[in-house]
Structures are given as structure tokens and as C-alpha cells.
Image (cartoon, grey):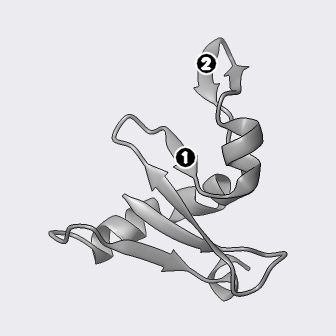
Amino acid sequence: MKISIESLTKPGTFYTVLFHSDGSAECGCPHWQFRLKHKVAVRKGIKYRAECKHIQEARPFIKTAREFTAGMTDVVFTVTREMLY
């Protein structure tokens, strides 16, 4: 599932967050691509890939995106700044 998140610091700039079936995610923003992509964090004994703010902001929209895009393929659910705050 892909969710496009509008940047809060650069209005009009959108970053695509890709969620995998195992719950992991990746983002197209430079911070995730060049700094966080290979970082692994441990929380309560569980290893997980580090997340940028776009991934964290997109997570609450997964259920809504699935409902709106049910049965569709290659669809990107877009979240604007107004939807975030």
C-alpha cells in the first residue's frame, strides 16, 4: 500500500510511503533514504527499521486508505497537510 504524505516544512512537496504486508515501511524522503534506511532500532526487545516522520504520520491512515482503495491496484492514497493537523 502506498500513501503520499505532504511535507509540513515544504508545502506542495509529497513523499511516498510504501507499507509492506509485514508492517514494515519505507519512505522516499531524503532523510529516510540516506540516514534511516539501514538503521535498526530495538524497542522492548523487538527489532524494527527506523522510521521517519512521514512514515509515522502515514500509519494512522492505513485503514482509511485500504477502505478507499479496496479492489484497486497501483493506487496512491494522498494525505495533505490539512488532513494531518
Q: Position of residue 75 (x, y in %)?
A: 31, 72
- Left or right: residue 39 versus residue 16 is right
x 15%, y 69%: residue: 71
Q: How many marks?
A: 2
Contact check, label 1 and label 2, Cβ < 8 Å:
no
Residue mark closest to the camera, 1 vs 2:
1
Cα distance in 3D space between marks 1 and 2:
16 Å
**Dot label at residue 26:** 1
Give the secondary structure at mark 2. strand
Q: Nearer the viewer, residue 79 or 26?
A: 26
- In the displayed structure, 58 sits above or below 84; it is above
| Residue sitting farthest toward the right | 9
Q: Give the quarter of the image for residue 62.
A: bottom left
Q: Position of residue 36 (x, y in %)?
A: 72, 37
Residue type pointed to by label 2: Lys
x 66%, y 53%: residue: 56
- Circle 2 packing at 10 Å, graded few (<14), some (14-19), many (20+), is few
Q: Position of residue 41 (x, y in %)?
A: 71, 23
Give the secondary structure at mark 1. strand
x 48%, y 66%: residue: 3
Q: Position of residue 50 (x, y in %)?
A: 68, 35
x 38%, y 34%: residue: 22
Residue type pointed to by label 1: Glu
Q: Give the quarter of the image for residue 14.
A: bottom right
- In the displayed structure, 68 sits above or below 43; it is below
- Circle 1 packing at 10 Å, graded few (<14), some (14-19), many (20+), is many
Q: Which residue is mark 2?
A: 47
| Residue sitting farthest toward the top | 45
- Left or right: residue 18 versus residue 54 is left
Q: Give the quarter of the image for residue 74.
A: bottom left
Which image quadrant: the N terminus? bottom left
